[in-house]
Structures are given as C-alpha cells and as structure tokens.
C-alpha cells in the first residue's frame, strides 16, 4: 500500500503541504479556504489515495469527525447552505490526484443561489 507519493502536494513530510490544518485526526486533516465569495474547507487524507473509493474502513470511520470540524469552522461565515463534493478522475475535474473533499459555503445571493451543484460548477 502506497502511503505517500514524493511529487504529491499533500504528501509532504508534515502531510499538510504547508497549509495550516484547522483540525486533524489519525487519518485526515482539514484546511480552510476562507476567501470570498464562497469560503470553503477541504478534508484530505494523510495517506495517498486518489479517490475516496480507496479509503480504508478506519479512514471512513475517522472521516465524519473531520466533516463536523469543517462545518464548525465554516459556521463563522453564516452560510445558508453547503455544496459538498469530490472530483474523482480527470474527466470529473480532478487536478490533484490525492483524494480531497470540498465543503463550500453557499448563499441565496450566489449567482446560482437556490440551484444545485451542476449550476454552481457551470456558472
């Protein structure tokens, strides 16, 4: 099992690519992307896997804790909703081939406010 990949931005020695984690546990870390117009966070596994389909049972067990931490952090931006998504594979828009979940604050005033993921991504 590959645990890290030398050329992967999230497989650095500290496991965080220089981003200061807002939370971490034994399997994942959370990084904040607070810049408007849509503050967001990402959950990233320490172990190098390209897709969530490759997570171990332990990684899935730890995942919920990090999702709670990301939501707690994003609450300060008073979102009216969230867009939560994975890009898996180049055809789906994955550019960094180390699994990571995006949690994005959403507001009714967004250009595609009140509409789903497809409209948010394609705006």
Image (spheres, rainbow, N blue to C red):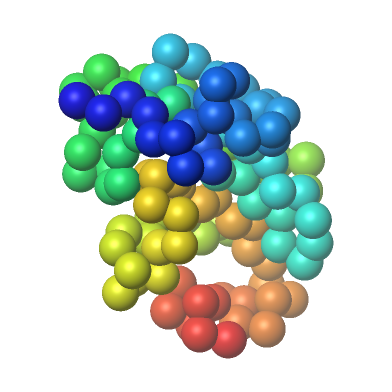
Residue 104 lies left or right of residue 77; in this view the side is left
Q: Which residue does the image show at 72% across and 54% down from the upper left?
A: 39
Q: How many marks?
A: 0
On the question of residue 114 being in view, the answer is: yes
In the rendering, at what x and y percent does residue 123 appear? Answer: 58, 86
> For the N terminus, which image quadrant?
top left
Whole-percent x and y of residue 121?
51, 77
The residue at 21%/38% (across/down) is 54
User: Closer to the camera, 83 or 48?
Assistant: 48
Q: Residue furthest top?
A: 26
The residue depicted at 40 percent of the width and 20 percent of the height is 27
Residue 68 in view of the camera: no
76 displayed left or right of 61: right
Q: Where, by quadrant of the figure, is residue 53 drawn?
A: top left
Q: Is residue 50 left or right of residue 34?
A: left
* Closer to us: 64 or 79: 64
Q: Residue at x 45, y 35 (%)?
A: 6
Residue 96, given in percent of the width and then of the height, sits at 46, 54
Residue 58 versus residue 19 in the image, above or below: above
Nearer the observer, 88 or 5: 5
Up-down relation of residue 41 to residue 83 (above or below) = above
The image shows residue 93 at horizontal and vertical percentages of: 41, 70
């Amino acid at each position: 099992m590959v645990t890290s990949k030398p050329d992967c931005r999230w497989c650095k020695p500290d496991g965080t690519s220089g981003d200061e984690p807002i939370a971490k546990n034994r399997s994942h870390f959370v990084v904040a992307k607070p810049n408007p117009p849509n503050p967001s966070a990402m959950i990233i596994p320490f172990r190098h896997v390209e897709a969530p389909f490759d997570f171990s049972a332990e990684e899935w067990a730890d995942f919920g804790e990090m999702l709670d931490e990301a939501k707690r952090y994003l609450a300060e931006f008073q979102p009216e909703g969230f867009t939560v998504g994975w890009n898996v594979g180049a055809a789906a828009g994955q550019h960094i081939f180390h699994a990571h979940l995006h949690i994005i604050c959403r507001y009714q005033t967004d250009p595609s406010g009140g509409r789903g993921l497809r409209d948010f991504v394609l705006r």
